[in-house]
Image (cartoon, rainbow, N blue to C red):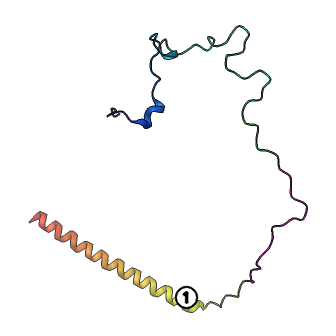
Amino acid sequence: MTTPSGERPEDDFWRRPPDTPGGASGPTAAGPPSPTAAVPPGGQPSGAPPVGAATGYAGPPSTTPPPPGWRPPLHLQAPPPRRLPPQDMAELDAAEQRAQLVTWSAGGVAAVVLVVLVCVLCSRVLF
């Protein structure tokens, strides 16, 4: 938790209201109000909407459906898709094998470098 370092105007909204001249500052001076304290003898809490009034969200306004058969306007017709060229499966397999060879070679070189590096570091610690 941090301590306030000075007055900041953006925090004014969250500050407690100043004390009244009588010394009490509302419900916080005497503790929180009891739930039955705000209900008058008639049974309706003060500040509450009338008993028959609608409360809460009534939902979105109703809309009218579009006429039957309606579609958005079509301004541009896309051409049909082209036919893809045939694939040479033997060439794809050869390319995949070359890529696998390159990957394994790079991994082998990295492993050799790491083993040499570990050996050098261990030899410096031991000797």
Seen in the picture, residue 56 relative to 51 is either above or below; the reply is below
Identify the residue at the far left of this view: 127
Rate crowding at label 1 as few (under 14), some (14 to 19) or many (20 or more) other CA atoms within 10 Å.
few
Point out residue 4 in the picture as x, y percentages from the top left corner: 34, 32
Q: Quadrant of residue 80?
A: bottom right
Identify the residue at the far top of this view: 41
- Give the structural element (helix, strand or loop) at label 1: helix
Is 123 left or right of 8, judged from the image as shown? Answer: left
Point out residue 73 in the picture as x, y percentages from the top left corner: 81, 70
Q: Across the whole image, how many numbered discs are drawn on residues? A: 1
Question: Considering depth in this image, is 65 or 92 the residue closer to the camera?
Answer: 65
Point out residue 92 in the picture as x, y percentages from the top left corner: 55, 88
Q: Residue at x 69, y 21 (%)?
A: 48
- Magenta: main secondary structure: loop
Question: Considering depth in this image, is 9 or 90 the residue closer to the camera?
Answer: 9
Is 126 left or right of 94, judged from the image as shown? Answer: left
Q: Give the range drawn in magenta.
A: 62-80
Residue 68 in magenta? yes
Seen in the picture, residue 33 relative to 69 is either above or below; the reply is above
Q: Residue at x 47, y 31 (%)?
A: 14
Identify the residue at the far right of this view: 68
Seen in the picture, residue 34 relative to 4 is either above or below; the reply is above
Amino acid at the residue labelled 1: Leu
The image quadrant where one finds the C terminus is: bottom left
Residue of label 1:
92
The image quadrant where one finds the N terminus is: top left
Q: Which residue is drawn at 74% across and 80% down?
A: 78
Q: Quadrant of residue 44?
A: top right
Is 33 left or right of 20, judged from the image as shown? Answer: right
Point out residue 32 in the picture as x, y percentages from the top left corner: 53, 16
Residue 65 in magenta? yes
Question: Considering depth in this image, is 16 or 103 the residue closer to the camera?
Answer: 16
